[in-house]
Image: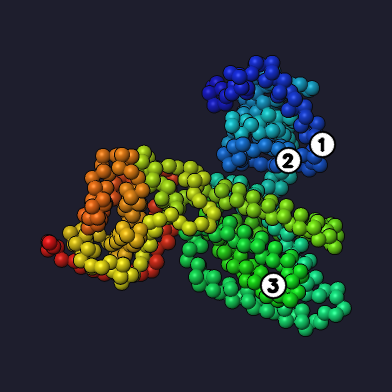
Amino acid sequence: MNTHQFFSPPGSSLSTELPQDQVHSENKKKCTQRRTRADQSRKGGTDDKSLCILTLSIGDVKRWCHAQPDSTGPLLFEVFGIVDSAAQKESDCSKFFILRDETGSIGCHFYEIDRHLPNLMRGQWHRCVGMLHSKREELQCLSVRQAGLEERRAAHRRTTVFLPQGYPETVSQDYLAYQIWDTVQAFASSLSNSLAAHALLQGIGVGDENATVLAATMTWIMKDGTGMIGRIIFAWLHGSSLDCNAKRWRLFADFLNDIAMCLEILAPLFQAYFRLVVCFAGVCKSIVGVAGGATRAALTQHQARRNNMADVSAKDGSQETLVNLSALLCSIVLLQTVSGHFWLTWIVFSLLTTLHLFANYRAVRAVCMESLNQARLHIIMQDYFSYGTVPDVVTVNLREPVVMIKSQKPNIALGVSFSTACSRYKDFESIKKAYSDLSSKYLLCYSKDRDLLIIVLSHEAEVKDQLQACVQAELLRFLLQKPRQALSPQFQHLVSHLDVDDEVTAMQLTYKASEKLMPSLLQELKSNGWITSYTLLGANEWRASWKFSSSKHD
């Protein structure tokens, strides 16, 4: 079989812009710069003082390509695999071969600049260290040699101590990218927390001969007490929305955590209000504990793909413990350096906070959830109504807003009480007229002057009915926001009823339109990787029963 059916020849993307000799010169420069540093790695290990080398399976290298398509920097990958093809000389003076393991296969290039490619034993295990060409999903190898059994076992142990059993098949595809950025943010947060703890102890009076133990104890008790109250109140007010918008709340929690640490560092400067500032910071950290813990559980449930949520959670705890231990050792040096230097403390804290927020944003952006919440459903339906296609999971998650901002109007309230829906209408007959001839398990109430979309659910309403109710609401939203000339003919007659304030007819027509498209929509959602067996649309618990007369009303 011709391997080039699956792997593009190296330099092919540059051949239309650069001569072959220039491409060869650039490849030579890249390889010679990094090959020297790559040789510093120990035999059978990945320790390197000047380069970061990640030991991954071939499947994980490809996952990295998809998660970080434009990744750059001093990063090398160490992979172990079986040579699956004979080395073939390419036009740019490289030799090409295929390496595979149980997770997949990848094309490898070796540039014979200052050394020759060793004899490859087809069907035998080899160790390759090289740079990743993300766009072509290929390795530019700097070191290739045969790998023994013990060496492979050592590499396997390094990847399984902190990874779930059966990795990567037992976790979601976004697991690796998320965990890498989560590790970076945890390290930065741990260092920042050390600075905050140092300032907090200083403000309480540690080292001050005039400070009393009782005063310090009372301050600490008040800090913990207000935090406990804040934790209870926040869980009561927002606990039900943490599952639906896990990514938003995750980012919000980390942002609030930085604010809390900032307040703790500032607290010693305001001795007159020290307890008040510390208590407020304690409330912020208690909210972080609830939001961060709950959303981490939601993300762990998303990552676990073989009913192994406990294993994924335990290994995540091991990773975090290792990161915190490393940060603890660094904190010893850091605190000795910044202690007594006000501006240096703030410069270091600002840098760590920036890194923490950036890593958190990248971590949340790396998550690709297949469940449907209102934000993701809105993106899907906008594309579906505009182009007639359902976007895939990755595309929608990249477009999903993760910053905690006010949602766009008109708002959709799912599962409200019947009295709430009726209180927003001057005439109850409008609801009765709209649904008297429809066998609907929900009531979508639209108030044009208030820009509100309120959905009352029946006791018999299932997941499909909730989804259809939100689809109908999105159809109304789409018709209200799009100009008539931008709509397809099948929607223009619906807009005419909205223009003349005929809300009853608009409800009936959009209900029939949504009911008609639901079978094909569900099929396309499933074929594009979306989960439709359950939703995260944020429905409240109110349910109602009704029976409208089918008689005509004038």
Question: Which residue is under mark 3?
Answer: 278
Which quadrant, please, contains the N terminus? top right
| Identity, as a three-letter code, of the amino acid under mark 1 | Gln
Name the side, left or right, on which 59 lies relative to 44. left
Name the side, left or right, on which 354 lies relative to 539. right
Tell which of 325 and 364 is nearer to you: 364
| Identity, as a three-letter code, of the amino acid under mark 3 | Val
Secondary structure under tag 2 reads: strand
On the image, the x and y values in percent for residue 74 come to 73, 38
Secondary structure under tag 3 reads: helix
In terms of image quadrants, where is residue 389? top left
Question: Which residue is under mark 1?
Answer: 40
Question: Marks 1 and 2, Cα distance to the nearest angstrom?
Answer: 11 Å
In terms of image quadrants, where is residue 36? top right
Question: Marks 3 and 1, Cα distance to the nearest angstrom?
Answer: 48 Å
In this rendering, the answer to whether 512 lies above or below 201 is above
Which quadrant, please, contains the C terminus? bottom left
In this rendering, the answer to whether 60 lies above or below 141 is below
Question: Marks 3 and 2, Cα distance to the nearest angstrom?
Answer: 42 Å
Question: Which residue is under mark 2?
Answer: 53
Name the disc covering residue 215, or none.
none
Q: Residue at x 79, y 22 (%)?
A: 114
